[in-house]
Amino acid sequence: MAATIPKIRFLTAWFCPYAHRATLALEHHRGRVEYESVEALGWQKNNDDEWYYHWKSDELKQMNPSALVPTFVLEGYRSVYESLVCMDYVDAISQATGTSRLVPEDPYWAAQCRIWSDKVNRECCSPYYGVLVRQDDTERREHFENLLSGLRRFSKQLAQTDGPVFLPGGQLSVVDLTLVPWAFRFYVLEHYRGPKFAIPSEPELEHYRQWYDHVMNLDSVKRTLPDKDRYLEHICKYADGSARSKVANAVRRGVAAHDLDDEKDEF
Ligand SMILES: N[C@@H](CCC(=O)N[C@@H](CS)C(=O)NCC(=O)O)C(=O)O
């Protein structure tokens, strides 16, 4: 590996799907990029109240103004954060070429990747938190319908290439990795909200299903998935309303997970 590539100190949390995106990019480029993982976030109870809050390492608080994982610390003093940016960064420093790139060299397809990563994040990932955090069943249903609409749009888009992934030629990209952590975690919705919240087997989602089977079988994905039961125990704090995280607080305030706002955040 070229000596100019900085080793990444990866501030993460095993349960976090945003951090999982960064892990997937790092593992895709295993051998090209060096990193060490540090668990920098977890749960704690303050006083005797019923809520769970995040404890954070001092390093995380120092290196990211919002103190969120994923955060990459470079050479001890510089940092890169925001999961979509972290994936781009790993790809850029990997020095990979051709179909090994997660953001293609072709500027048109690179632009398509940026458009669709953002869209998938908003439409297929953020609604997951609405289903879990909102306490009213009608509202949960609305968030679930939004999630399905997002997945149908993604599925339709997949049909435009020769499949099974977002880019032509079967090239894995940041768009696929944006969704993988949530696609894996959708079993949680049925577990906590019942069979009506299972992702249905319907023709409109056929390409999504094919995509799912393909990506879940990739080595870089298989070796990074959290244990399903352990994750259920973690996400229970969202399902029962006791989590006081920035994402959960934003959704309880009535905005989307991607609109979390440090200024308005209050426990
Ligand atoms: N927009 C951020 C969201 C990251 C995020 O919310 N991470 C959660 C863990 S899953 C976190 O660090 N929470 C800390 C907090 O809520 O204070 C990204 O894409 O990286």
Image (cartoon, rainbow, N blue to C red):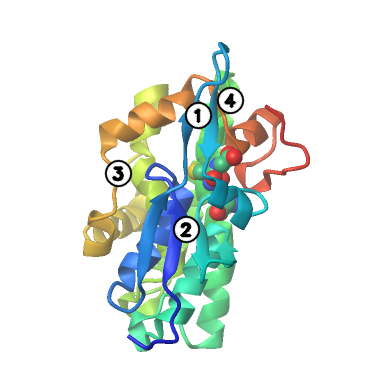
Q: Mark 2 vs ligand 1: CB under 8 Å?
A: no
Q: What amino acid type should be assigned to the residue bearing mark 3?
A: Pro
Q: CA gap, disc 3 to disc 2?
A: 24 Å
For numbered disc 4, what is the local secondary structure?
A: loop
Q: Which residue is mark 4?
A: 134
Look at the image and tell me in which quarter the N terminus lies: bottom left
Which residue is label 2 attached to?
154
Give the Cα separation between the discs numbered 4 and 2: 25 Å
**Residue at left offset 35%, top offset 58%:** 207
The numbered mark at residue 99 is: none
Disc 2 marks a residue whose amino acid type is: Phe
Other-residue count near label 2 (Cα within 10 Å), few / some / many at <14 / 14–19 / ≥20? many
User: What is the x, y in percent for residue 3?
Assistant: 39, 87
**Camera-side mark, 3 or 4:** 3
Comparing 28 with 77, the one in front is: 77
Determine the residue positioned at 45% across, 72% down: 90
Pointer 3 with pointer 2, Cβ within 8 A: no
- Whole-percent x and y of residue 248? 59, 33
Q: Are marks 4 and 1 in contact (CB under 8 Å)?
A: yes
- Amino acid type of disc 4? Arg
Q: Please state which of the two labelled residues, at mark 1 or mark 2, is closer to the viewer.
A: 1
Image depth: mark 1 or mark 3 in front: 3
Q: Label 3, secondary structure: give it.
A: loop
> Which residue lies under the disc numbered 3?
226
Instruction: Judge whether residue 163 can be spotted in this image.
Output: no
**Residue receiving disc 1:** 132
Residue 256 seen: yes
Q: Amino acid at mark 1?
A: Leu
Q: How would you rate the neighbour count of disc 3 (Cα within 10 Å): few for under 14, some for 14-19, many for 20 or more? A: some
User: What is the x, y in percent for residue 30?
Assistant: 29, 72
Crowding at dot 4, Cα within 10 Å, few <14 / some 14-19 / many 20+, comes out as many
